[in-house]
Image (cartoon, rainbow, N blue to C red):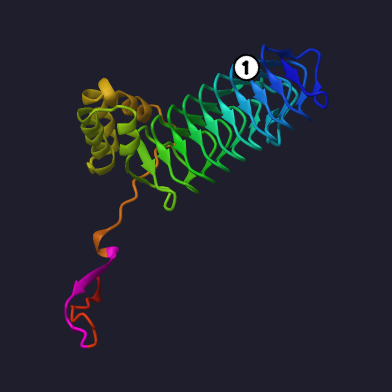
Amino acid sequence: MSIDSLSVISPSANIGGNVEIGHFCIIEPDVVIGDNCRLSSHVTIKRGVVIGNDNIFCEGTTIGNLPQHTSVGNDVGGVIIGNNNIFRENVTIHRAMHEPSLTQIGDSNYFMVNAHVAHDCRVGNNNVIVNNVMLAGHVDVGNRVNIGGAAGVHQFCRIGSYAMVGAQAHVMQDVLPFVTVDGLTSRIVGLNLIGLRRNGYSTSEINILKEVYRLVYRSGIAWKDILQKLQDEYSTGVAAEITKFVLTTKRGIVHEGRYAENSLLKFNRTTENKSSTDSNNEDTPALKINVG
């Protein structure tokens, strides 16, 4: 164990083996830190935090502050963190609102600079939370999710596993598993095909997910009929995760972002008005704009 003399460590904190703590860190009472963790300088671990093994906390990270809520009381819950996570500079994670509830972080997540996880959130495993992401209270993030920089997620929303949320998106409803949210429009723009292939999903599995996607977003049938069809035809296999997710949503799901064909500006190339001054004597296409 290596603890810098300029750090303040409570005698009642439980520090595991082979832990490195840099200078100006503060570890409060009622803290558990597992083996092989590394704390850089100016890291603060507040009371009520339990940390697993092999986690890295970079400069300025603060874990276990009180919830940012106007009605926070004295019976706040805690924070529990799994193994092999990386918390880059100035990440903040807050305690749950009430005992015995917990703000939960799983294993092998990567939180980039200035990311914030509010009270009562649950973050699964192998997620990438990019710079300045804001997770409001009670947000639930699945596994292998990528949330782009400065995205904001409204309280009580869920983000399904293998989803990708674009930078600066405003997530106000649940994000289905396996889909992509466009950062500009905050709408669904299709399946996260790159993520699916990288994680070993076969072509046949992806085709099934495409069927479910079309059913949910493009079938045009009544929502109750969509729910029934999901239960009847997609309650097992790779699609079962979407079915379970849709059946348990409380906030509704993020809509697909589709543009009406006639609303776009179309640029058609034409070889009219051949340039007489072109040195190569080639056609110089003009742009004709059609609206409608």
For this orientation, the residue located farthest to the front is 279
Question: Which of 21 and 28 lies nearest the eye of the viewer?
Answer: 21
142 falls in the magenta region: no
Answer whether residue 19 is visible to the viewer in this image: yes
Residue at image point 43% right, 36% down: 174
Q: Quadrant of the N terminus?
A: top right
Question: Residue 211's spot in the image, x, y percent?
Answer: 22, 35
**Apparent side of residue 42 relative to residue 103 in the rendered image (left or right):** right
Query: Magenta segment range?
Result: 263-276
The residue lying toward the viewer, choosing from 181 and 59, is 59
Residue annotated with mark 1: 36
- Lateral position of residue 172 relative to residue 53, left or right: left
Residue 14, quarter of the rendered image: top right
Residue at the extreme bottom of the image, as rendered:
276
Residue 155 x %, y %: 55, 36
Q: Residues within 10 Å of mark 1 (few under 14, many from 20)?
A: many
Q: Quadrant of residue 44?
A: top right
The kind of residue on which mark 1 rests is: Asn
Q: Nearer the viewer, residue 232 or 52?
A: 52
